[in-house]
Amino acid sequence: MIEESRLRRMQFRAWHRGTKEADLLIGGFFDKYARGWTTAQADWFETLLDEEDVDIMSWAIGTAAPPAPFQGELMQAMQALDYIPIAP
């Protein structure tokens, strides 16, 4: 189980990216999946948080291929984009 303090730090970083679009993409992804992560998956996400928002967003929407360290199950979940609320 991941420590609550670590989850809170990751959540803050995920939701305070600097743009509304990045907040929704990265923060929304965190909110949907973080509680079920293993330590290795949390490590992956923390490493992802160090990347530029424009890069993360381009990997998620498929306009650029993610680098090898970010490819895999979690990036595929991020690319689903089913965690972003769409207002009517």
Image (cartoon, rainbow, N blue to C red):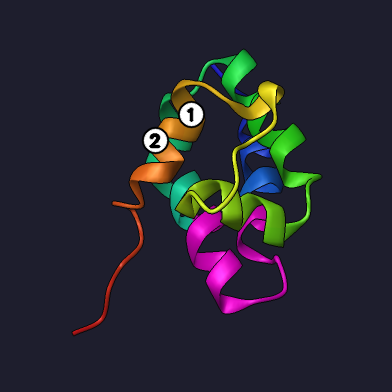
Q: Which residues are magenta?
A: 12-27
Q: What residue type is disc 2 on?
A: Ala
Main secondary structure of the magenta stretch? helix
Q: Is 14 situated left or right of 1 in this image? A: right
Q: Is residue 13 visible?
A: no
How far is mark 1 from mark 2, CA to CA? 5 Å
Name the quarter where the N terminus is drawn.
top right
Residue 75 drawn at (x, y percent): 50, 33
Q: Residue at x 46, y 48 (%)?
A: 29
Name the quarter where the C terminus is drawn.
bottom left
Q: Is 43 situated left or right of 65 in this image? A: right
Name the image quarter holding residue 43.
top right
The correct choice, above or below, for 45 with respect to 56 in the image is above
Q: Name the element at disc 1.
A: helix
Seen from the viewer's position, the closer of residues 77 and 43 is 77
Q: Name the element at disc 2.
A: helix
Seen from the viewer's position, the closer of residues 78 and 6 is 78
Task: Check disc 1: other Cα within 10 Å, few if <14, some if 14-19, many if 20+.
Answer: some
Find disc 1 in the rendering and name its residue.
74
Q: Residue at x 65, y 76 (%)?
A: 19
Residue 80 drawn at (x, y percent): 33, 44
Find disc 2 in the rendering and name its residue.
77
Q: Residue at x 42, y 32 (%)?
A: 76
Residue 83 drawn at (x, y percent): 33, 53
